[in-house]
Amino acid sequence: MSDTRISLTTGAPGAAVLGIGAYRPRRRVTNDELSQTMETSDEWIQSRVGIAERRWAGPDETVVEMSVAAGGKALAASGLAPEDVDLVVVASASLPTMIPGAGPEVAHRLGIRRPGSYDLNAGCAGFCYALGAAADAIRTGSARHALVVGAEKLTDVTDLTDRSTAVIFADGAGAMVLGPTEDPGVGPVVWGSDGDQRDAIAIPTGEDSDGKLTMAGQAVYRWATTKLTETLQQAMDRAGVTAADIDVFAPHQANLRIIELMAKRLGLSEDTVVARDVVQAGNTSSASVPLALSALLESGEAKSGDLALLLGYGAGLTFAGQVVRLP
Ligand SMILES: CC(C)(COP(=O)(O)OP(=O)(O)OC[C@H]1O[C@@H](n2cnc3c(N)ncnc32)[C@H](O)[C@@H]1OP(=O)(O)O)[C@@H](O)C(=O)NCCC(=O)NCCS
């Protein structure tokens, strides 16, 4: 038995977000369009979920294609060259194939040579999980620059004639490029799960299943509005900031009522910009947080240097949140 000690690498004091990119599928689907094929109405959808329209991807807008589009924009915004990136993580709950994963192909398509690369499925919390893992990789020295993508084609796993899910879930991709910094731009991730509620959002298997997503809407609503304020508070505590310091609140875009309730409970300042991308984008699962941030930066509502509080939550049930400084 060798008693040689294993030595460890240490990376940068912190990781920072260097660029954000997004891809929204071409096709807009309004509530009125949906009400032509199922028993629903614009009034019901807007009042219960706050969605006015969503994007549905076409056959050519695959998880990989959307990831490449969003990742390419994030890379361009970061000012880095593809060869600078040595870690690529794709968070998705709607990958078309389990083998091979999407990450290596996305990296290859972007000209990123031989990075560490994997996919991560933590339901709608996937992006915040991946962001936490990538930032930690930069701090431990396993990576220097990371591309983190959240991409979903939920229309592939949704019964588009089932009004309880079809009006909610949608498609898109968002991405961030991270790099090393002295002054941390990504706070510690607070992550967790409640596996006793694994059936609340699921794609049931077995003979009776159509392979489509089912959701116990009320149970998820109750869980999200009672359990997650604590997670948001912990994310701020661990980053050493208070609600008064938060410029932008960008939680998972699942339901406008949940977003408004969380914002109220946190005691955010009146000036805090609250992401409401769900109104235009629907619930895009692990793509929703970077899509929402990208929209706020594009419109000028959020600015470079702003402190943003992020939260992802969903199937598992899983949750993850952190504070980041916007690039
Ligand atoms: C899904 C959600 C919008 C449903 O709203 P709700 O107020 O709980 O509605 P319910 O499921 O109790 O359904 C109420 C009625 O509306 C009906 N309904 C469901 N979807 C409908 C639709 N799109 N249009 C019209 N009626 C609809 C139901 O069939 C039910 O009818 P009934 O009373 O005749 O049985 C809500 O529960 C929710 O947002 N939950 C959180 C989900 C979430 O955030 N998921 C994402 C996690 S990643």
Image (cartoon, grey):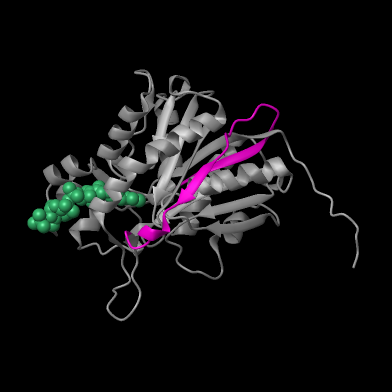
Residue 35 visible in this rendered orientation of the protein: no
Q: Residue at x 27, y 78 (%)?
A: 208
Say which quadrant the C terminus sits in. top right
x, y percent for residue 235:
50, 35
x, y percent for residue 87:
65, 50
Q: Residue at x 80, y 48 (%)?
A: 8
Say which quadrant the N terminus sits in. bottom right
Q: Is residue 63 above or below residue 273?
A: below
Give the residues drawn in magenta, as a range: 173-200
Residue 181 visible in this rendered orientation of the protein: yes
Q: Is residue 241 above or below residue 238?
A: above
Q: Residue at x 31, y 63 (%)?
A: 213
Number of numbered labels in the structure image = 0
**193 drawn magenta:** yes
- 274 vs 151, left or right, is left
x, y percent for residue 102:
54, 61
- 261 vs 252, left or right, is left
- 39 vs 25, left or right, is left
Q: Is residue 33 above or below residue 59?
A: above
- 111 vs 242, left or right, is right
Quarter assignment of residue 293 = top left
Compare residues 255 and 113 and report the one nearer the observer: 255
Compare residues 268 and 176 and report the one nearer the observer: 268
**8 drawn magenta:** no
Compare residues 205 and 228 and report the one nearer the observer: 228
